[in-house]
Image (cartoon, grey):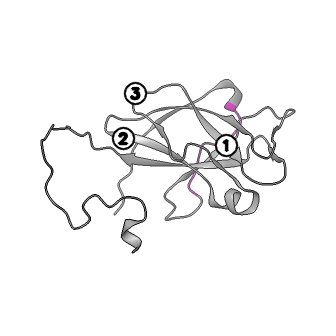
Amino acid sequence: MTATVRIEVLQLPHGRGLPLPAYQSGQAAGLDLLAAVDEDTPLVLQPGMHALVPTGLSLALSAGFEAQVRPRSGLAARHGVTVLNAPGTVDADYRGEVGVLLINHGSAPFVVRRGDRIAQMVIAEVARAELVPSATLPASDRGSGGFGSTGR
């Protein structure tokens, strides 16, 4: 059973008229975020360029939760467009606009139009850590093996 978390959403003036983020299937983990760019001025992402795309939304997340902004696999597979800082984190105490930092890794310009699904947002619980200084750490099977060490 999946718990439902209630989140207050404010549609900013440039986001009005767009639908709220929505799940696209019954078991989808992420809500699709839409581009709130001006109807008459689409955003053109040239190859290798990045831009902060507005969503026209602000959130009021409850303490102990975050919103993760993640890429949409279809945009990455078809166009080479992804979220640059994936996953982006929206903290529970942030009340500004949710933005999506897109980058075009493809070879052709990519046009972002008003209402395009540009990313997905996953709501997740957050555990807060208490870091405890220690002179040594307990042993583990992996030890200090770093990048690529588990594939050998």
Residue 98 image offset from top left, x and y in percent: 57, 33
Majority secondary structure of magenta residues: loop
Would residue 23 be found to the left or right of residue 34 on screen?
A: left
Among the two numbered marks 2 and 1 on one chain, the one whose residue lies closer to the N terminus: 2
Q: Are marks 2 and 3 in contact (CB under 8 Å)?
A: no
| Magenta-drawn segment | 15-23
The amino acid type found where label 3 is placed reads Asp
The amino acid type found where label 2 is placed reads Phe
Name the image quarter holding the C terminus: bottom left
Instruction: Determine the secondary structure under disc 1.
Output: strand
Find disc 1 in the rendering and name its residue. Answer: 102
Other residues around mark 2 within 10 Å, as few (<14) / some (14–19) / many (≥20) = some
Find disc 2 in the rendering and name its residue. Answer: 65
Instruction: Determine the CA span between mark 3 and mark 1.
Output: 23 Å
Residue 49 image offset from top left, x and y in percent: 75, 40
Among the two numbered marks 3 and 1 on one chain, the one whose residue lies closer to the N terminus: 3
Would residue 45 be found to the left or right of residue 58 on screen?
A: right
Other residues around mark 3 within 10 Å, as few (<14) / some (14–19) / many (≥20) = some
Instruction: Determine the secondary structure under disc 2.
Output: strand
Dividing the picture into quadrants, the one containing residue 107 is bottom right
Instruction: Determine the CA span between mark 2 and mark 1.
Output: 23 Å
Find disc 3 in the rendering and name its residue. Answer: 93
Which residue is at a point 39% across and 33% down the rendered structure image? 92
The amino acid type found where label 1 is placed reads Leu
